[in-house]
Each structure stands twice: as structure tokens, then as C-alpha cells.
Image: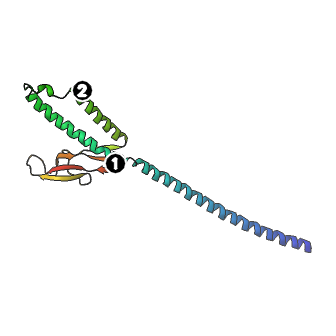
Amino acid sequence: MEQEKNQKTEIGELKKKLEECQKLKDEYLTGWQRERADFLNYKKGELERVGEILKYADVGLVLKVLPILDNFEIAEKKLAENLKVDELRSSSPFADARVNDENIKGLLQIKNQILDFLKNQGVEEIKSLGEKFNPNFQEIVEIVETKDKESGVVIEEIQKGYKIHGRLLRPAKVKVAK
């Protein structure tokens, strides 16, 4: 009888230990699951952060390319102006000094390659001319009194502005009507 009593006591103690072990196991499992979820969230956040860093990693290079593109734009405008002047002077003895069409095509092709490169990097031009002035994307260089245009409208673009992946890279420098 006493042996039966000892066995029941021992069984009771073992059941208590088993319950304690079960509770401890549940606590460990819950803690592990929580830590695993935290780690997965951390990993996801890090991947997003690295993705953002890589997305904008080329900004420095792009900023160095933009002045080259600006110079192509200026050269293109000057070339158009000079060709108009040359047409007027075509009877002059200097008419044979006109620029070769193949050279012009080559320069424009280089400009287009730069534009394609920038587009592939996620760069897009900010449309300014004829638009309402937007201080988020444009910088006023001059305000011009005019009766032809509505006040606050961009009437001339001095330097093109650009965005990269939707973020401002360089504001457009503009003249605005008053």
C-alpha cells in the first residue's frame, strides 16, 4: 500500500514536471517563433534598404554626365543658329566652310546615346516649358514681365531639370512670366 502511495506521489510529481516541461517548451517555441519572425522582417527590411542603395548608386555618375548633356544641348542650339546664318551667307566666299552633315549626325547620335544611357539609369527629364512653375522641380532664374503668357508660367528653360526614379536629381532653371 505504501508502495502504491509512493508510486502515486511519484506519478503526480512526474506529471507536474511534465507540465512544467510542456510550459517551458511552449515558451521556448513561442520565443523562437517570435525571433524568427523578427529576423525575417529584419532581412526583408535590409533587402529593401540595399535595393534602395543600389537604385540610387549611380546618382554621382549621372550628375557628372548631365553637364556633358547640357553642352550637347547648347552646341545643338548654336549649330541650328549658325546654319540659319550660313544659309543667308551661302553666296559668300566662306560658304564652303559650312559644317558637314555627317559630323552633325554623329554629334546628335552621341547625344542620343547619352540620353539612352540616362533613361536606362531611371533618369527622366522634367517638363517645364509652358507649364506652371513648380518650386519642387524648378528654380527661377528670372521673372519676365509679359502680356502674352499667364503669370507663373515657365516661358524659357535655361537648364533642363531631371528626376531619377521619381526623385529630384537637378531642378530645371527657368524664366517665369509675371
Residue 43 at what x, y percent from top left?
A: 53, 54
SS state under label 2: helix
Residue 108 at what x, y percent from top left?
A: 26, 33
Relative to 137, does residue 111 appear above or below in the rendering? Answer: above
Residue 102 shows which numbered tag?
A: 2
Of mark 2 and mark 1, the one earlier in the sequence is 2
Towards the viewer: 102 or 32: 102
Query: Measuring 33% from the left and 37% from the top, which residue is drawn there?
Result: 116
53 sits to left or right of 130: right
Q: Of discs 2 and 1, which sits in the foreground?
A: 2
12 sits to left or right of 155: right
Mark 1: few/some/many CA within 10 Å (<14, 14-19, 20+): few
Identify the residue under disc 1.
166
Query: Measuring 33% from the left and 44% from the top, which residue is drawn there?
Result: 123
Quarter containing the N terminus: bottom right
Relative to 68, does residue 137 appear above or below in the rendering? Answer: below
